[in-house]
Amino acid sequence: MAVKSLPKSNNNESSGRERSLEPKEEERLLAASSEPLRTILMWGISAGLNIPSEVLSLKWKDVDPQCQSLTVQGALSDSASSNRGR
């Protein structure tokens, strides 16, 4: 799965800040991505899901084409980080 490198953004954003991609950024990201990453990114962008945790936790049973809905049951977690407090 090859992804071409994208030019760095000129934004001076703090590293902990979350933001949405601008439409042109989405286009560049999708154009630079190959499958299956491109499909994962499209699901995340179109449904507003976190990538990779929510997108990669999806199962076919979560998709209802008749109602045109998607149910996010949960999110994947890094088992190493989730076990630190135990």
Image (cartoon, rainbow, N blue to C red):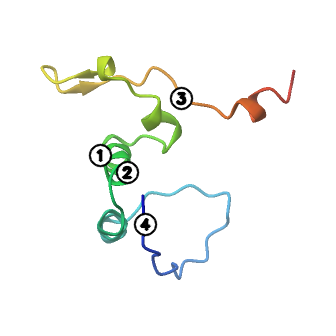
* Residue at 29% from the left image edge and 68% from the top image edge: 31
Check the image and report above or below for 28 versus 72: below
Q: Earlier in the sequence, mark 3 or mark 4?
A: 4
**Residue 46 shows which numbered tag?**
1
Residue contact at pointers 2 and 3, CB within 8 angstroms: no
Which quadrant of the figure contains the C terminus?
Answer: top right
Judged left or right of residue 58, residue 66 is left
* Residue type beneath disc 1: Ser
Judged left or right of residue 64, residue 38 is right
**Considering the numbered disc 4 on the image, is that residue within a helix, a strand or a loop?**
loop
Check the image and report above or below for 49 versus 11: above
For disc 4, the marked residue is: 3
For disc 3, the marked residue is: 75
Q: Residues within 10 Å of mark 1 (few under 14, many from 20)?
A: few
* Residue type beneath disc 4: Val
Q: Earlier in the sequence, mark 2 or mark 3?
A: 2
* Residue type beneath disc 2: Leu
Using the rendered view, name the quadrant where residue 4 is placed: bottom left
Q: Looking at the image, is mark 1 or mark 4 nearer the viewer? A: 4
**Residue 41 shows which numbered tag?**
2
* Residue at 51% from the left image edge and 23% from the top image edge: 74
* Residue type beneath disc 3: Ala
Which quadrant of the figure contains the N terminus?
Answer: bottom left
Q: Earlier in the sequence, mark 1 or mark 4?
A: 4
Name the residue nearer the viewer: 3 or 69. 3
User: In the image as oriented, which residue stretches furthest toward the left?
Assistant: 66
**Considering the numbered disc 3 on the image, is that residue within a helix, a strand or a loop?**
loop
The alpha-carbon separation of the residues under discs 2 and 3 comes to 16 Å
The alpha-carbon separation of the residues under discs 3 and 1 comes to 17 Å
Q: Earlier in the sequence, mark 2 or mark 4?
A: 4
Q: Looking at the image, is mark 2 or mark 4 nearer the viewer? A: 4
